[in-house]
Amino acid sequence: MSLGVAVAALTRASLLTTMRYRASFVGEAVMAVAWAAWTAAPLFVVFDQAPTLAGWTAEEALAVIGFFIIAQGALEALVDPNLRAVVEQVRQGTFDFVLLKPLDAQLYVSLHRTEPIKLVHCLVGLAIVAHSARAIDAGAVELASAALLMLAGLTLLHSLWTVVVSSAFFFVKVDNLSWLIRAGLDAGRWPVSLYRGVVRFVLTFVLPIGLVTTYPALALRGELKPSTGLGALVISVLFGMLARVAWIRSLRRYSSASS
Amino acid sequence: MFRAFPTLLRIGLAEAVAYRAELVIWVLTATAPLISMFIWDRVAEEGPLGGWGQGEMARYFLLTLIVRHITSSWVVWELNENIRTGGLSPMLLRPMHPLVFFVAQNLAAMPLRAVILAPLIAGVMWWRPELMWTPEPWTVALGLLSAALAWVIAFTVQVIFGSLAFFSQQSLGLFNVWFGLWSLGSGYLFPLELAPDWLRQGLLWLPFRATLATPVELLAGLVDGPSALRLVLAQLVWVGVFLGIAALTWSRGVRRHEAVGA
Amino acid sequence: MIQVNALSKVYPVPKRGEGLWGSLRSIFSREVEEVRAVADLSFSIQAGERVGFLGPNGAGKTTTLKMLSGLLVPTSGDRVVAGFDPSKRDPAFLRRITLVMGQKQQLLWDLPPIETFALNRALFGLEEAEAKRTQEELIELLELGPLLTRPVRNLSLGERMKCELAAALLHRPDVLFLDEPTIGLDVRAQVAVRRFIAEWNERSGATVLLTSHYMADIAALCPRVIVIAGGALRYDGPLKDLAERYGGGRKVIVRTRDEAPEQLGPFVREDGALVARLPSAEVTAAVDFALRQVAVADLSIEEPPLEDVLSKLFAERT
């Protein structure tokens, strides 16, 4: 049907665009492995000093790193390039052309600029999670629920990003905001239960990177209470709705105030 | 050349004030030591490690944050940008070395960086008051000297990678590799004292710790006299080495620039 | 095809105080100033018409085009375009209109134009065979053949504009909003774009509403013009009557072989020639008079330059 055709055409165009700039799959893969090693190194130093930390072993915390790398890969492949493109379009006024296409604008801006080669990072992250799952000896149920929570976490990230893009219609310098959020998300490489008080609250509910990295790892360990898991799913659905509302409101503002 | 320096500082400060929003964002994005602080605080909670309790952890990472912001600069990006776009050419025509300009720009932004950092510092001190310590005067003196040397090394390294842009499109990529190794080897993400033995021994021979861990450990009073002197001497050696490399890459690069143009 | 009734647009613009103190104060108390971009504008355009939309910078032309294409919500008044309320941006509506902006481009910068065409065909859900046919037609009319496989960033401004037009017309819209499509182009490219717009209008029967600062565009393309200034309608009617009404009429210039006669009729002496400024109805009589009374060496009739007419019209404040 025509929606599928439109999505395929958008994906094709952004593939062609990014292919002009970077081509080396091997180079990207090497970078991805080095990046993963760099991300995991502090963890090994910590667990060299303490065999378990707040109930987490090194292998289990490694799963958090794995999910973190998957999330970052998804951000860099699918989310960040789109964000930069929209900010640029709003700045130059060419966003008007997006609105004049007979396709949902939120769908359009989520797809129109992607860098699929960065998905290599997700593969490396998956490998780390797989290693960790074997060490933990996770069963089928655990794997399935971890996968479900990971998907929920990724949609959550996408919603968060949509909110950021929506703010591009109010403030111009959103790319700076996205750097700040990226720095905040960096805290997600550690299990969120290692943090205390305000920081933990923020990482669970405000900038919910904990939901993206820690909860799937908890599910993998089989320690996620069904109610908590359900709560995480509810939160990601809520964020999705929030993002939709923010998007529609900012579009309305765009079409009443821009010149 | 040095008569112009106060003017350069004044302009640099005005510039930093004009870009204050960007500066705030930039300071806030370089707060990785705070994350490490929370994690290591948790580790120390289950029992002090080799004399490091929660107070020492907080002290170490607070100083890491401060020294990191004292010693960081943007020269590598500035040089890269100016070399690529040809903006360096007019700078070469001024009767002043372009690097003097960048030094002034860097120093001039320090007061503003301090202002932005102050609430974070206050927050950490309120959160973990145990971090307070009474340092010996000689450690403070040596620590400040060491911080100044760390600034020189960090700045020079950026000049080296920045002037690689004379020769290669990939200079920023190379700098990112350096930054990755640096953050693991300098004590930025974890205290070197608590790293595995083989790593700590190896890092003694590498330049990374001279730009961060050395002044931090001195200021925190975590090092005894003889090793303090040894560490500062090592810094002096690195200052010499990097200044030499920078002089070489810069002069070669400028000659190439003059020959090829930008 | 286009019905506009009492359309108004008011922008709230936050008032900023001067200096540091002023900008601090404006964080807390937001004084808002209202800027009226379009005021009580009404007109209607029939299917197939080519209408020039004129006005000085900041007159509200672009604002009006954006309201008509659904990008901007009007403060009051209503408009119907192709039977739709544009504000809803109904996909069925978007398939019937197009907007081309000379200052902004929709072509994918790093890819050849052919890729933007492919993307638009998919986005508009066009039937492949028919869309291909339209595409071929546009490529031929605009002579795009050699440009199709070169990345857009390597094209000249004029080449890019021609590709923009093709990309915007693939879905064969019934209404074309063209906002300064010739801006910045050299004379040859301007002529090419102009010719194409006229040709396409005739072939497809689409309605064209065009703004431009180049009067040659308007003179060549638009039998009818709508002039606005300060957001309000100043003139709506045939282009030729515009010159009549605001240009001080046509200019008849007569050079004589010998001394001018005593009887000058409608003429006055100006720089050694006889000159008369007249409404067009009286021009024949004046020429008649000159031929009978004077030994004519040379006789010419000049239209007032459109630029002069317009600057007179813009200057006139109501």
Image: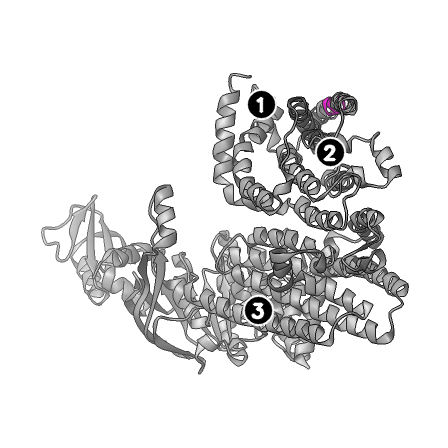
State the extent of the magenta-drawn residues as a range: B242-247
Image mark 1: chain: B
Q: Crowding at label 1, few (<14), some or many (≥20) Cα neighbours within 10 Å?
A: few
Hey, what amino acid is under mark 3?
A: Ala
**For the residues marked 3 and 1, what is the alpha-carbon distance in whole angstroms?**
52 Å
Q: CA distance from mark 2 to mark 1?
A: 39 Å
Mark linked to residue B213: 2
For numbered disc 2, what is the local secondary structure?
helix
Mark 3 residue element: helix
Looking at numbered disc 2 in the image, what kind of residue is underneath it? Ala
Q: Main secondary structure of the magenta part?
A: helix
Q: Quadrant of the N terminus of chain A?
A: bottom right
Which residue is identified by label 1?
Answer: B93
Q: Position of residue A33 (x, y in %)?
A: 83, 52
- Tag 3 subunit: A
Q: Nearer the viewer, residue A236 or B142?
A: B142
Q: Is residue C186 magenta?
A: no
